[in-house]
Amino acid sequence: MNEKLTVLIVDDEPINRKILHKMLSVEFTVLEAANGEQAWEFLNKKEVQIAAVLLDIVMPVMNGYEFLDRVREAKMKDLPIIVMTGESGSEAEQKALNAGAWDFVTKPYKPNILLSRLKNAIARSRVSMYEQIQHMSEHDQLTGLHNRSKMYEDTSRMLQKYPDTRFIFLRIDIDHFALFNSSFGEQEGDRLLCYMASIVEKESRRYRLCTYGRMNADVFCVCASYEGDEALLQKWVNAAEEELCAFRRDYSLKMSVGACLIDDTSRDVEQYYIRASMASVQCKNQFEKNLAFYNESIGEQVSNEIAIANEMQTALDEKQFVVYLQPKFTVATDSICGAEALVRWKHPQKGLISPGVFVPVFEKNGFIAKLDYYVWERTCQLLRKWLDDGRKPYPVSVNISRISLYNPNLVKLLKDLVEKYNLCAGLLQLEVTESAYMSNTELMEKTIHDLRGSGFTILMDDFGSGYSSLNTLKSIEVDILKIDMKFLSADGEMEKGEIILASIIRMANWLGMSVTVEGVESRKQRDFLEGVGCDSIQGYYYSRPVPEGEYEETYIYADGGAALHSQKTEETSPKHNVTLLVIDDDEANRAIINEYFCEEYYVQQEASAEDGLAYLHQNKSKVRLILVGNYMKAMSGIDFLKFCQAESSVSSIPIIIMTANDSAEDQVEAFQAGAYDYITKPLIKEVVLARVKHAMELNSQLRTFEMPKKI
């Protein structure tokens, strides 16, 4: 026997409730309420399932219209409510229906009419409920698009109906959506998904035959008729991505679209989804690629990537990833000045795996952010260890992937890390690729500005490999440019490459940036770079990337290595009686001059004009020539020159001004102050040698002719 449905009677007149109870109790379970407030309490009792409500209008506490308003606000639109009133006429009925009532009956009640209307209302609600269930089973609850099963069903039906039409299956997702979700919160992530759904729906309407839906998370699919016009499809994708980027201007959004041509309409739709998914992987972390087509070779590649992805978390947990260090050397002195931390995968079965194999996979699936942090922290641990052992470590640079750069919490992560290990931020240098910088310059400029403001040294890696120009140098806020040696061929005979590389180095130096060239493998390359003013070199000519232990043994703990608490301060005896005094606050420039002249002269290096004057006061008889940088803190080179010219005891010593500014005004001022010559940085060996020789010869002639001293 079927269980009776429950009906709630709401009327403040006991006699009316009694009459209705008698009418309905044969077929229904009847509940009674004397006003809207009591009725509302019944509706909120989860153990009571009410099939319909018979509602009086005029009642104390809460009248019928107030009850209807509350039901509407609670979105209980599927609950049948029949209004009962002594008023008659179309106006009263219309008012009740507008308030949300399903039907309307007037007093006195006619049992047959009342029962019929009640049963019809309940039946209609059952149909409405079924339709809702049906809709929920076919649609995504968040976006309202068809869900996976419904989209597959409609797609299969469309393919069968139009067997002679060419179709294409597209899989669309938002790159690094999980990172966006964690950065801005689930609510903002849901808003982004709804926005993406509206784009898919709008763009899909352009096609004559089309199905579309949301598969899961940030994955959407479209199956549409296709005329083979790849350019038109690319235009469709670009239009969708452009609209996606408008969602947030402070965050770089990119979509990846995998396309698969449908060559067999009898094949299961899921197979095309899998193929399109494989194709979409080809777009990940590809700056200007947002559409890729499936082909057979992709299948094999994806299988390999899946194998790597399946092991990546275990490898991280078990510390299978190890840090290798490749030293960097100052060109002028051939002495170490730092290192770059690189990662290798020491697999227990496969041995050492090159980063070229696993890093691209991690960049595609987002795992690179975890690996980044792992390497950063390991590098900090090494630096802390060396400091605790009383050594003075050289700065170590670490790489920041594009994904990590987009993390709004990046600055805080890095600041917290150096604070955790009590390190100076300058010891942990940060390498950012040029392509990442150029992909969203506004966002990158802010991030890099904040990092530099926190004390970190910023290196732009692979400069010149992407879409930047020399003009970019004036606007980027970085400390060191890293340039790959690919500008030159292995034998160093690419004249155009040499010109470009030399131009970049000189311009960078003029703008106050240091330059490191990586990938240097030969003496010829090293000598060329020294000649054009390169500051430091990284490459196999000096050292391959080496394990932590080998780096420590060679550069940290070796005899004569950098010890913090045992540095000797006694002066080295001059190798020659004739001294060249070099004054510059840039250690690299002093080192370059020392390298050029150390075989012929004793080169005394001072970091400020004040220190130079102090040395000159004690050793003026030995100093043959002075090279002084112009732009220094406190006393400039011109001021130093003027001071020396006013001191008769040192005014005869020739002074050459060194500066990165080649303006006519500065040169005139220098010569008017008494400079013998003026050398523009970068310090090119042939130029420096020739001008120093010329200044010494000129000074010798002046001494020979016993020119009168200047007043």
Image: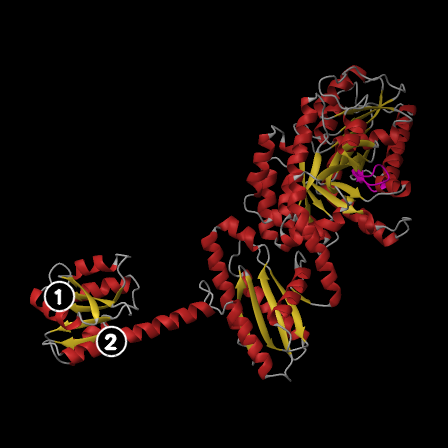
The kind of residue tagged 1 is Asp
Q: Indicate whether 321 appears above or below 612.
A: below
- How many labels, in total? 2
Residue range of the region highlighted in magenta in the rendering: 531-545
Q: Earlier in the sequence, mark 1 or mark 2?
A: 1
Q: Which mark is residue 11?
A: 1
Element on which disc 1 rests: loop
Q: Residue at x 55, y 72 (%)?
A: 152
* Quarter occupied by the C terminus: top right
Packing grade of label 1 (10 A; few <14, some 14-19, many >=20) is many
The answer to whether 587 appears left or right of 364 in the picture is right
Q: Looking at the image, can residue 511 be seen? A: yes
Residue at 64 percent across and 65 percent down: it is 274
Which mark is in front, 1 or 2? 2
Report the quarter where the N terminus lies: bottom left
Instruction: Determine if residue 457 is in view.
Output: no
Residue at 52% x, 49% y is: 182
Query: What is the secondary structure assignment of the residue under circle 2?
Result: helix
Is residue 374 shown above or below 486?
A: above
Instruction: Check residue 89 for magenta coloring.
Output: no
Instruction: Please identify the residue farthest to the front as the structure is shown.
Output: 1
Give neighbour class at mark 2: few <14, some 14-19, many 20+ (Cα, 10 Å). some
User: In the visual, does 485 lie left or right of 11?
Assistant: right
| Mark 2: amino acid | Lys
**Separation (CA) of disc 1 from disc 2:** 20 Å
Discs 1, 2 touching: Cβ within 8 Å: no
Q: Is residue 595 above or below residue 174?
A: above
Please name the residue that numbered disc 2 is placed on.
119
**Label disc, if present, on residue 188 of the rendered structure:** none
